[in-house]
Image: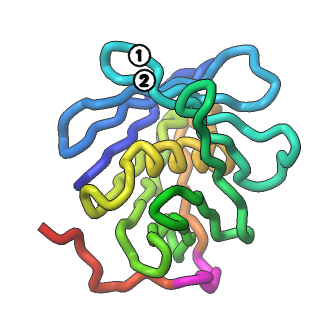
Amino acid sequence: MTIEIKQRKLSFFQDKYEIKVNDEPKYEAKSKLLTFYPKIVICNLENRELLSVDKKSENIVGLNFRLRFGPNSSVDIHTDSLIAFSIKNSKGTIHFYEQKNNLIGIFLNENQIGLIDKNQKVSFGADEYSIQIEKGIIDEILVIAFVLAYDCQYNNDKGAFVNYDWGNVVIKPVKEIDPNWTVTK
């Protein structure tokens, strides 16, 4: 499965994202205006809210967000280290490990199930993410929510005309991706 997330260009007051799954528009996301801590809402194409991505007020350092599926259901994104993050759900723990350049490996427990690739050339503050993920293993909206939280926390450069984001070029990943990994058909 391929997921493309594109931030709209020239949106100075509100972040807006277009999200395609397998080349078909499926979701839209936008930041809420006038909130003290960042909050992003993911909606279907009929503008029905599916998920809210809320920065946790008790731990503002790092990537600590709550993903709310309604008033009574939520999961948290945890910062495990400066370059490792996780979400616990009913299938286990989804780990996100930053790699060199602009790559993030996605693992369910210890098995690689996906890869996130962020654009290096950013024009007018419009970040773009391409995600390859095994279909049906985890809910795609969790990965989308992670990417939006990650973008909000670390890559929100709205004022830049053209910016080059080389990513992490000297890190040693906590867990390296398999260089031969591909999505199974």
As helix, strand or loop, the secondary structure at mark 2 comes to strand
As helix, strand or loop, the secondary structure at mark 1 comes to loop
Where does residue 169 sit, x and y in percent of width and height? Answer: 58, 76
Residue type, label 2: Cys
* Residue numbers of the magenta segment: 169-175
Quarter holding the C terminus is bottom left
Question: Against 60, is 42 above or below?
Answer: above
Tell me the quarter of the picture where residue 118 sits: bottom left
Q: Residue shown at 28%/31% (left/top)? A: 26
**Magenta stretch encompasses residue 171:** yes
Query: Few, some or many C-alpha atoms within 10 Å of disc 2 (few <14, some 14-19, many ≥20)?
Result: some
Q: Which residue is mark 2?
A: 43
Q: Residue shown at 57%/30% (left/top)? A: 52
Query: Which sits earlier in the primary sequence, circle 2 or circle 1?
Result: 2
Q: Residue shown at 58%/58% (left/top)? A: 87
Asked whether the viewer can see residue 17, the reply is yes
Which of the numbered marks, if any, corresponds to residue 48?
A: 1
Q: Nearer the viewer, residue 141 or 33?
A: 141
Question: Against 48, is 159 above or below?
Answer: below
Q: Are marks 2 and 1 in contact (CB under 8 Å)?
A: yes
